[in-house]
Image: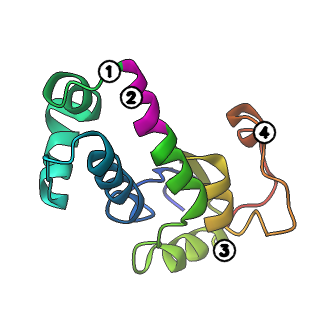
């Protein structure tokens, strides 16, 4: 095997999170905080890339600190209650890679529960890690 370990971003690499979680949560935020502002998914992708999501919120939409907090809580609730779909073929690719002896590392700002649920590491009966540090503890198994 040429590469012993794959280091993957979770959001929009393994799973379709912008279209299914981030954008809908942001639209919900806009409906509450800026009802006169409408943004398409393509616009949201563009602004998130340039100038960046933080600049979109602070410099373009002029969110106050309390509005930023509201936006974050809205996104967090959405991220905790919706599990994004894996991109077609990704699960099978990662399963084949792991079966061939490869190691998989996930790097993300996602909520740990989302990653663990999507990889099958967290069932409804399991408790999610309390902190990102707990989620980062090494596991002996991967996909």
- Mark 1 and mark 2 residues within 8 Å of each other at the beta carbon: yes
**x and y percentages locating residue 19 in the rendered image:** 32, 63
Q: Is residue 67 magenta?
A: yes
Q: Which residue is mark 2?
A: 68
Q: Earlier in the sequence, mark 1 or mark 4?
A: 1
Q: State the SS at label 1.
A: loop
**Range of the magenta residues?**
65-72
Q: Earlier in the sequence, mark 1 or mark 3?
A: 1
- Mark 2 and mark 3 residues within 8 Å of each other at the beta carbon: no
Q: Residue at x 34, y 59 (%)?
A: 24
**Majority SS type along the magenta span:** helix
* Side of 113 relative to 37 (left or right): right
Q: Residue at x 73, y 34 (%)?
A: 131
Q: CA distance from mark 2 to mark 3?
A: 43 Å
Q: Which tag is nearer the camera, tag 2 or tag 3?
A: 2
Q: Which residue is mark 3?
A: 99
């Amino acid at each position: 095997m040429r590469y012993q370990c794959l280091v993957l971003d979770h959001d929009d690499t393994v799973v379709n999170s912008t279209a299914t979680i981030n954008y809908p949560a942001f639209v919900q935020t806009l409906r509450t905080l800026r009802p006169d502002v409408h943004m398409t998914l393509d616009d949201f992708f563009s602004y998130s890339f340039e100038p960046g999501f933080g600049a979109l919120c602070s410099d373009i939409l002029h969110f106050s600190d309390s509005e930023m907090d509201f936006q974050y809580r809205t996104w967090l609730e959405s991220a905790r209650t919706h599990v994004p779909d894996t991109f077609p073929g990704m699960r099978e690719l990662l399963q084949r890679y792991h079966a061939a002896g490869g190691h998989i590392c996930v790097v993300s700002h996602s909520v740990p529960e989302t990653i663990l649920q999507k990889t099958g590491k967290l069932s409804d009966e399991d408790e999610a890690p309390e902190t990102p540090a707990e989620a980062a503890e090494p596991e002996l198994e991967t996909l």
